[in-house]
Amino acid sequence: MKLKEWVESAKKQIDTLDCELIAIKTLGFSDRIDIIMHWEDEYDFSEADKLLEKRKNGLPFAYISGEKEFFGRKFKVNQNVLIPRPETEQMIISALGIIDAEKYQEVSIVDVGTGSGCIAVTLKLELLNAGVKSDISGVDYSVPALDTAQENADDLGAYVKFFRSDLLLSITELPDIITANLPYVDMKWDWTSPELKYEPAMALYADDGGLKLIKKLIDEIVEKSDNKKKRFLLLEADTSQHDAIIEYAKVRKFELISHDGFIIGFKY
């Protein structure tokens, strides 16, 4: 079959861009220009048809391709980790803003619920580029997720320590900054994407309107804090949850310092 025939047929079933990306992945092309150059050429599309069927059934393209771009870098992803999303990039911007404002020359960061490691690895590399010395760790309850995070760190040349922990259970001393993209989706929400069913449920859903683990993390910080130095917490949550989180944190003496997109920043 000619490439143009396969693409035209596939376009009737899935998004045009996804068709082209599947062709690029399965035919060994470098980019979409190759599609134009080989538009009239004949190929075996058996592998492409398998991926087309998966995408048609709703499997996110990031899991099909095995990678997703985050803050200008490609991270490996699989169904053991959440797919990095554009809104999470604000976490990086907010953390770098704190580090710049506080004039840190050396900073410690723990990324809780690290998943693919995209936050921890990105911060390590961005701070390295900025000449800031950093001690960064990523913790997760899922061992397969930690394996993926370590693979990403190795591939991108970032020295980040990854280890298993149930929130802060294995953390003995609080860092300067905690970043956390914890499960916050409420199972009762009826407006979420059907593609979420392919992502790891333990990384998505939480009880108490999606706030159970976020509240637990705040409580654990209170228990571990020595109040001897200023520290920071950055959380991701749906905007509909922000007022409840801010109120919960305020009662526990956290001071709101930023509120950008899905990311809330506190000082404590």
Image: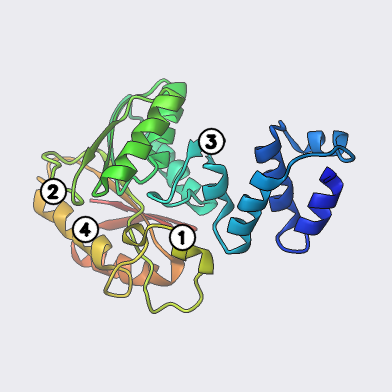
Q: Position of residue 258 (x, y in %)?
A: 40, 54
Residue 198 tag number:
1
Q: Is residue 183 visible?
A: yes
- How far apart marks 2 and 1 lie (CA) works out to 28 Å
- CB-based contact (under 8 Å), mark 2 and mark 1: no
Q: Earlier in the sequence, mark 3 or mark 1?
A: 3
Rendered residue at 55%/56% (across/down): 60
Farthest top residue? 131
Q: Position of residue 189 (x, y in %)?
A: 43, 77
* 106 versus 178 height, above or below: above
Q: Residue 257 versus residue 242: which sits nearer the camera?
A: 242
Q: Earlier in the sequence, mark 2 or mark 1?
A: 2
Which corner quadrant of the image does residue 134 belong to? top left
Q: Residue 124 versus residue 261: which sits nearer the camera?
A: 124
Q: Secondary structure at mark 1?
A: helix
- CB-based contact (under 8 Å), mark 3 and mark 1: no
Give the residue at mark 3. 74
Looking at the image, is mark 2 or mark 3 nearer the viewer? Answer: 3
Q: Earlier in the sequence, mark 4 or mark 1?
A: 1
Is residue 256 rendered to the left or right of residue 10? left
Is residue 229 rendered to the left or right of residue 122? left
The disc labelled 1 sits on which kind of residue? Tyr
* 90 versus 151 height, above or below: below
- How far apart marks 2 and 3 lie (CA) works out to 30 Å
Q: Secondary structure at mark 2?
A: loop
The disc labelled 3 sits on which kind of residue? Lys
Residue 169 tag number:
2
Rendered residue at 61%/51% (across/down): 51
- Rate crowding at label 1 as few (under 14), some (14 to 19) or many (20 or more) other CA atoms within 10 Å: some
- Rate crowding at label 4 as few (under 14), some (14 to 19) or many (20 or more) other CA atoms within 10 Å: some
The disc labelled 2 sits on which kind of residue? Leu
Give the residue at mark 4. 218
